[in-house]
């Protein structure tokens, strides 16, 4: 089950997926909630332990630039791994953030 499907299954609002969030840059968010009281981007970073894209210095710097730009637009940014998705930790963290932001 995808992370988006997990969110819906536990009653969370359905996120937009693979959506551009920046007005100029072509960055895409893996999952995004953009309601005024819920502004969250979740990035699923794969390849962490196999010298993949998200474990290289230049890519990490690009990810930092993207996260800083998202923060400047009022989004919180959460990075999770595929393991976090599989074991349910990611959806639990998302649920906690969304509930906190609604208050």
Image: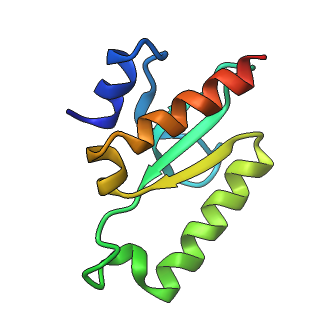
Q: 18 or 43: nearer the eye?
A: 43
Residue found at the far left of this picture: 1
Residue 73 in view, yes or no: yes
Q: Position of residue 68 (x, y in %)?
A: 72, 60
Q: Position of residue 29 (x, y in %)?
A: 48, 45
Instruction: Give the image quarter of residue 66.
Output: bottom right
Residue lying at 71% horizontally and 56% vertically, measured from the top left = 69
- When the figure is inspected, residue 32 is found, relative to residue 45, above or below; the finding is above
Residue lying at 53% horizontally and 28% vertically, measured from the top left = 95
Does 23 sit left or right of 12 as displayed? right
Residue 34 in view, yes or no: no
Residue lying at 46% horizontally and 51% vertically, measured from the top left = 43
Does 9 sit left or right of 26 as displayed? left
Residue found at the far top of this picture: 11
Does 96 sit left or right of 19 as displayed? right
Q: How many marks?
A: 0
Q: 97 or 53: nearer the eye?
A: 97
């Amino acid at each position: 089950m995808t992370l988006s499907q997990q969110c819906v299954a536990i009653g969370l609002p359905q996120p937009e997926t693979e959506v551009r969030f920046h007005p100029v840059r072509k960055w895409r968010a893996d999952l995004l909630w953009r309601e005024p009281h819920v502004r969250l981007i979740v990035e699923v970073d794969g390849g962490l332990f196999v010298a993949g894209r998200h474990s290289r210095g230049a890519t990490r710097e690009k990810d930092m630039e993207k996260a800083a730009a998202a923060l400047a637009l009022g989004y919180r940014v959460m990075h999770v791994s595929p393991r976090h998705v599989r074991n349910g930790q990611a959806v639990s963290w998302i649920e906690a953030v969304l509930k906190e932001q609604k208050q």
